[in-house]
Image (cartoon, rainbow, N blue to C red):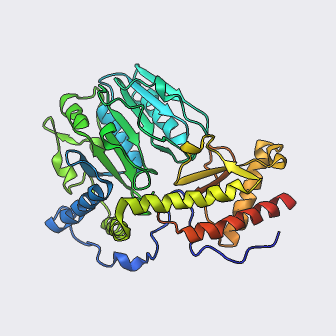
Amino acid sequence: MVKPTQRPQSPNFSSGPCAKRPGWTVDVLSNAFLGRSHRSRLGRDRLKEVITRTKAILGIPESYLCGIVPASDTGAVELALWSLLGERGVDMVAWESFGSSWVTDVQKQLKLSDCRTFKADYGVLPDFTQVDCDRDVVFTWNGTTSGVKVPNADWIADDRQGLTIADATSAVFAMEMPWPKLDVVTWSWQKVMGGEAAHGMLVLSPRAVERLERYTPTWPLPKIFRITKGGKVDKAIFEGDTINTPSMLCVEDALDGLKWAESIGGLPALLGRSQSNLKTIEDWAERTDWVDFLAVEPITRSNTSVCLKVVDPWFVALTAEEQAKVIKKMVALLDAEQVAYDIASYRDAPSGLRIWAGATVEQTDMEALLPWLDWAYAQTKGA
């Protein structure tokens, strides 16, 4: 196969940290609030601006709290699990590695006795009709390592008694969030908006706030998980104060991403860019005989972390170890050509490719990438 000549202008297709927004340069950080306390008035104002712009772009209800917490999405999820669970039984729903890790934490670290799990293999969703929303429910909105997302929240009862806790780190800003159905939503700056790592976002519904103010877990809470004071939610955390010291360089970068989102048309534009990238991949996969989506049902295909499997009989006949070597060679070829970086499937997932298709990726770059995938596969198969 002839080597393509057109390369993506940005070869960054990693699923986290993700590509910076188009036109980004380090100069956008020149006004970062450095050398000053983040607890000063100006420091808090900058942090509050992130929260305010985030709520406006996402359409988060005014009655919901939104704050910045430590340790990325992982910290935000753990904070929610350790602070909220234990009052009633919990249903854990998982179909990929990160969802499975939350199951492990609840069962082996919190050691909740009344914990039901609903799991599925990579590529498919569990049966959500079995989930009882009068219990607490923990799930990932988008399976970052499986490329399988929840298509809707119809399964969540409006009159539920339990809390719904959604790890939405690769979904927020790329997929519609039905806020009335969700009580806790978490994500990180380094995913969909291409921000820098180590900071998480936490959204709480009034129902979640009521739980925090009524219920105290039996286990001790580390300092970075404590968001109540004197039996009340510490509202300062959701107004620009933070539990620990944030990086103001990262804050400035997050603000730049939010301002870019506003400049292109807000959430509808972000969703449209991501869907266009997915459609580009879908059209290519439809006419390509060696590859297919890992997601079995089209409606569940992620439009951010697009996971692909190789269906060529030659590849399928290989052992798992041999398949992994083929993918490793493909990825190395693409890396050497400076066409695509970091697009191998997650280490726990079936051998394949994982391509980030969020809004910070230009559709022209996605179009330029796909012929290179055909070339790399042909080169590897012919070796």
Q: Position of residue 341 (x, y in %)?
A: 61, 65
Give whichever of 271, 357 is nearer the camera: 271
Q: Position of residue 360 (x, y in %)?
A: 47, 65
The answer to whether 216 is drawn above or below residue 303 in the figure is above
**How many numbered discs?**
0
The answer to whether residue 343 is seen in the rendering is: no
Displayed quadrant of residue 211: top left
The answer to whether residue 233 is seen in the rendering is: yes
The answer to whether 339 is drawn above or below residue 182 in the figure is below
Q: Position of residue 237 (x, y in %)?
A: 21, 50
Question: In the displayed structure, does residue 315 sit left or right of residue 117?
Answer: right
Q: Position of residue 43 (x, y in %)?
A: 20, 66
Residue at horizontal 23%, vertical 45%?
64
Residue at horizontal 77%, vertical 48%?
323
Give whichever of 137, 110 is nearer the camera: 137
Displayed quadrant of residue 78: top left
Q: Quadrant of the N terminus?
A: bottom right
Give whichever of 248, 299 is nearer the camera: 299
Give whichever of 56, 232 is nearer the camera: 56
Q: Quadrant of the C terminus?
A: bottom right
Residue at horizontal 20%, vertical 55%?
241
Q: Residue furthest right?
A: 382
Residue at horizontal 44%, vertical 63%?
194
Q: Residue furthest top?
A: 113
